[in-house]
Image: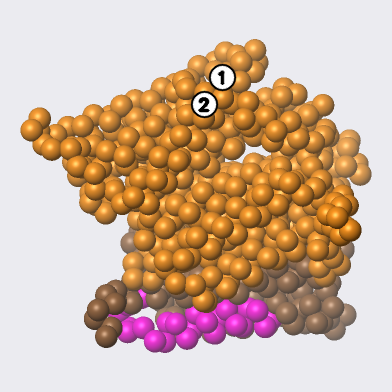
Chain colours: A orange, B brown
Amino acid sequence: MSAPILWIGLPLLIGAAIFLFSNEKYSAYAGGGVAALLSLTALFIPIDTALLLGSLSLKISPAIQVFGRSFEFSAADGPLLAVIYGVSALWFFGSESTGAAHRFSSLGLMIIALLTASIAVEPFLYAALLLEVAAMLIVFLLVPIYQMPGRGVVRYIVYQTLAMPFILFSGWMLAGVEANPGDLRTILQSGVMLSMGFAFLFAIFPLYNWIPQLMEESPPYAVGFLLWALPVFTVIFSLGFLDRYTWLRSTDQISNAILFSGVLMTATGGVFGALQRHLGRILAYAAIAETGLFLVTIGLRSSNLVDIVFLALIPRGLELSVWALALSIIKRKAYPLKFSDIQGLARKYPVAAGSLILAHLSIAGFPLLAGFPSRIALFQALSTESLSAAFWVFLGLWGLLTSAFRTLAAFVMSAEDAPWELNETWAQTLMLVIGVLGLFAVGLFPQILQPFLSSLPKLFEHLAQ
Amino acid sequence: MFNEIVSWVVVILTLATSAAILVSRDWRILLGALAVQYLAVFWLVTRHLPLAMGSVKLIAGWMAVAVLGMTRINLPPTEGGDRDQFYPRGSAFRLLLMGIVILVSAGGTPRIEAAIPGMGLPVIAAGLLLIGAGVAQLGVTNDLLRVSVGLLSVLSGFEILYAAIESAILVTGLLAAVTLGLGVIGSYLITAGSVPLIAPEDEE
C-alpha cells in the first residue's frame, strides 16, 4: 500500500461510494468514521518505515507515479495528515446534525482527498490545479439544487479560477529567477504574478467580498467547511513556496507586503464584523480576520513562524466547526439570522447559543479558549517587529470581541418570564459539547498539541531555521 | 510558413469569436462561438504540444459547450436568460471593451515574445485576446451562462500560453478536468433554483 493511495485514492473512492450507496442517516457516520480511521493511521503508522506485526511486515511506501509526475508523502507528513483527517472527521460527524449529511460527507471526503493531493503532488506548483478542482467541488455543497445561486457563489468560483493561472505562471517564472537571481525584471514580474494568485486564493482585501455574501446565501455549515478547508491548504501551499525559494523569504519587501495584507485583513475583518447585524456575516468577517492573522504570521521574519501558523491552524477547524454547526441549528428557527430574528434564543437553544459565543470568543483570542495561545505567541513575535502592526491587529481582534458581545446581547434579549427550553437534539448537543470541551482543552492545555507541533516544522525545513 | 499563415488566420478567428461572445445576446451564438473558439485553441495549442494532447483540450472544451447547451436548451426562454443589471451594457459599450482588449493584446504581444522567446506571436496574441475578452465578459455580466463562458475563455487563453512552456500530461489532464468542471458547474448553477423542492411524502 502506498501513502497517496491510502490518503488520496481511498477517500476519493469512499466519498463516491457514500454518494451512490449510503443513505442520509449513515452518511455522517461513514464519512466521519473513514476520516477518523485515516487520521489514526497517519498518527500511528509511520510512512516509509517497516512495521513488524508478528511475522507480518507492514510498510506504507511514500510515493506513486501518475502520468509521469509523482504524488509523495514523507514521514514528516504523518502528523499533518492526522490533523487534517482528524478535523475533517469532526466536520463529517457534525454534519449529521445539520440535515445535509449525505451530500456533505461524500463530497467533503472527496474535497479533502483532493486538497491532500495538493500537498503531495510534485512539482508542488500543480497544487494550484488540485486546489481549483477541490474549489469547484465545493460549489455543489454551497448551492442546493432547489436554491437559486446568488452573487457570492459566482464571485467565489470566478476568483478561485482566476487564481490558478497566476500561480502556475508565477511558478514557471520563479524557476527562471532561481536560474538567474540577478534579473530584477523577472523577479518583479514573478512577484506580482504570485501576489495576484495568492490574493485571489486567500481572498485578500478587497477580494473577500464574496465571503459575507456567501454566508448569507448558502448553508452555514458548508460555508464554514469551505472557510476552514481552503485557507488551511492555501497556507500550507504558500509556506511551501516560501520554503523552496530562498529569495522569497529573504526579500524584505515581500515579507512587508504579506504582513501589510494580513494586518489589513485582520483590521478590516474585525471592524466590519463589529458593524454587522447578521450572524452569518459576522462569522464570515471573523474567518476573514483569522485568515489575516495567518498572513501576519507568514509575514513575520521569525524562525517560529511555522510553529505559530500551526498553533493557529489546528484550533481553526474546531472553532469554525462548532460555530457553523451552532449557526445551522439556529438558522432553522431564526432565518435569516439577523439580530432581530435571534432575540431571546439563548433561552430556547442554550447549547447552540452558548457554543456559538464561545467559538466566536475563541477566534477573537479570548483567554482560556483555543485561539488564545496562538494569539499570544503572535503578539509576542509581532510586537518586536512592528508596534503599529500589532496595534491594528489588536484593533481587529477588538472588533471581533465587540461583535461577540453584541451577538450575546441579542441572544439574551428575552422577556424575563420566558421559560428555559432545550430544543437541540441529543446528537446536536453532544457534538456541540464535544467541540466546546475541545476549545477549552486546547486553551487550557495547549501542550496537547505539542506532539503535532514538534514534528510539523520538519515539513518546512528552511523556514524553521 | 503555411503554419504561420494559418496561425494568424486562427488569431483572427479567435478575435471574431471573442467579439461574438462579448457582444451577442443570443445564447446559441454564444455557445456556437465558444465551440469554434475551441477549434482555434486546438490549432494554437498543437504548435507546442502533440496532436493527442491538443485533442484532449478540444474534446474537453466541446464537452463543456455541450453540457452548457443541453442545460440551456431545456430551460424556458425567460429562465436563465440575460440577468445583467450593469450599466452601460449596450452592444456599443461591449464593442468598445473589445477594442480595448485588442489594443492591450497588440501592445503586450511583442513584449511577451521578447521576454519569452519561442512562444510565437500568434500564440501570444490569441492567448491575450481570449484572456482579455474573458475578463471583460466577467466584468460586465451576472448571467450564469455568460460567466461560465467568460471563465472558459480565460482558461482557454491561459492554456494556449501555458502549453508553450509546460507539456506535462498530468497538467493537460487536470486542465481538461477544470474545463469540464467549469462546464458542469455552470450547468448546475443555471439549473439550480429551477428544480422544485419536493417533500418525500409528495413523491409517493
Q: Is residue A451 above or below residue B79?
A: above
Does A68 lie within the magenta span? no
Q: Amino acid at mark 1?
A: Ile
Residue A100: image location, x then y, percent: 40, 62
Q: Relative to A204, is A402 on the left or the right?
A: left
Q: Which residue is tagged 1?
A: A376
Q: Which residues are magenta?
A: B58-81
Residue A249: which disc?
none
Name the residue nearer the viewer: A31 or B109.
Answer: A31
Give the chain letter at badge 2: A
Q: Which residue appears at 29% of the width and 77% of the height?
A: B200
Q: Amino acid at mark 2?
A: Gly
Q: Is residue A21 above or below residue A417?
A: below
Name the residue nearer the viewer: A210 or B157.
Answer: A210
Q: Which of pointers 1 and 2 indicates the residue nearer the eye? A: 2
* Residue B202 shows in this picture: yes
Residue A129: image location, x then y, percent: 68, 60
Give the chain letter at badge 1: A
Mark 2, Cα crowd under 10 Å, few <14 / some 14-19 / many 20+, is: many
Name the residue nearer the viewer: A327 or A136.
Answer: A327
Does B79 lie within the magenta span? yes
Element at badge 1?
helix
Residue B146: image location, x then y, percent: 46, 70
